[in-house]
Amino acid sequence: MFEENRVGNKIRELREAQGLSASALAERGQTSAHVVEELESGELAPSLAPLLKLARGLGVPLGALLDDAPHDGPVVTRAGQSETVVRFSGIGPATRISTLDFHSLAPNKRGRHMEPFIIDVHPTVPEDCTLSTHEGEEFIYVLSGEIEVTWGKERVQIGPGDSIYYDSETAHDVRAAGDADARILAVVYAPC
């Protein structure tokens, strides 16, 4: 189990508040009840695509799964003060391996449609790649290291100062290129 299961606990809290079973939420979120149960228990590291689908199934923005106390005013995140919101799996719908550490740059901002993050991208085994799809768009700017982005049948490697913007409804994957960590600024837009 992961040291902190804030996302799983929030999914359970929202699901129970709506009187939904894990199976009913899974159906709404177009995933399996097994994935919902393992995310809630902390057995699996979440992947962004299923979380977006579950948020949609719950009728809430992705941020509702990541935040504790939303407020309406501007959110200022000072240098070095972004906290790790969640560790994501970058290699499939959900797995026990965390390859992406997401640091939120807009924690608790109510009603947001964009999710800005600094993401530490850790190396993974290429054979483990499962492309992800979800509604919305993504913008990535590389701060350090090298990343490889697969988008549809295209594959591109980018480094510090490079950026990429793509439609996330096309199957895609972001991973560290080679054996070294990378750090990126990513903005994910997901319509509610």
Image (cartoon, grey):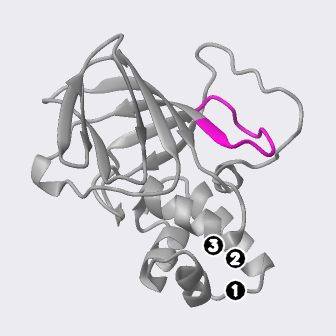
* Quadrant where the image shows the C terminus: bottom right
Residue 144's x, y, as percent? 33, 15
Residue 41's x, y, as percent? 52, 72
Q: Residue 179, located in which quarter of the rendered image?
A: top left
Task: Tell me which residue sits at (59%, 49%) in the image.
Answer: 190
Residue 65's x, y, as percent? 65, 56
Check contact, mark 1 vs mark 3: CB within 8 A.
Answer: no
Q: Amino acid at mark 1?
A: Leu
Circle 1 residue: 20
Q: Any mark on residue 136, and which?
A: none
**Foreground disc of the pair 1, 3:** 3
Q: Any mark on residue 57, and which?
A: 3
Residue closest to the far right: 72
The residue nearer to you, when weighing 64 against 167, is 167
Check contact, mark 3 vs mark 2: CB within 8 A.
Answer: no
Q: Amino acid at mark 2?
A: Arg
Q: CA distance from mark 1 to mark 2?
A: 5 Å
Residues in magenta, as a range: 104-115
Check contact, mark 1 vs mark 2: CB within 8 A.
Answer: yes
